[in-house]
Image (cartoon, rainbow, N blue to C red):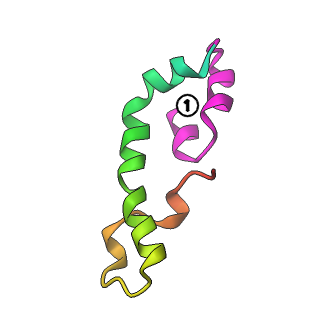
């Protein structure tokens, strides 16, 4: 199910698929994945607001972000 989270599937959908009664259970189990994902968001945001940034390789690919 980790692959679903990495693919951007919302946590509540993954929780339902796993049979977790509450998405907070899924969040606790996969918190490390969510934290790793969030670490690169600042770089993507910076690149979006500053298009003259020197090195686009500094952050994750924009397509790697989960949809909101």
The residue drawn where x is 38% and y is 60% is 42
Q: Residues within 10 Å of mark 1 (few under 14, many from 20)?
A: few
Which quarter of the figure is the N terminus placed in? top right
Q: Which residue is mark 1?
A: 1
Judge by depth and name the residue closer to the eye, 54 or 57.
Answer: 54
Answer left or right for 31 relative to 1.
left
Q: Is residue 19 above or below residue 8?
A: above
Tell me the element at label 1.
loop
Residue 31, compared with residue 65, is above or below; it is above
Relative image position of residue 36 (x, y in whole percent): 36, 44
Q: Which residues are magenta?
A: 1-21
Residue 3 is inside the magenta segment: yes
Q: Is residue 2 magenta?
A: yes
Where is residue 4 drawn, in percent x and y?
Answer: 58, 39
Q: Give the prevailing secondary structure in the magenta stretch.
A: helix
Q: Is residue 3 left or right of residue 60?
A: right
């Amino acid at each position: 199910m980790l692959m679903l989270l990495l693919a951007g599937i919302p946590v509540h959908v993954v929780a339902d698929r796993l049979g977790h009664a509450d998405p907070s259970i899924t969040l606790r189990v996969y918190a490390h994945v969510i934290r790793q994902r969030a670490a690169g968001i600042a770089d993507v945001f910076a690149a979006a607001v500053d298009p003259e940034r020197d090195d686009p390789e500094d952050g994750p690919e924009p397509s790697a972000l989960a949809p909101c």
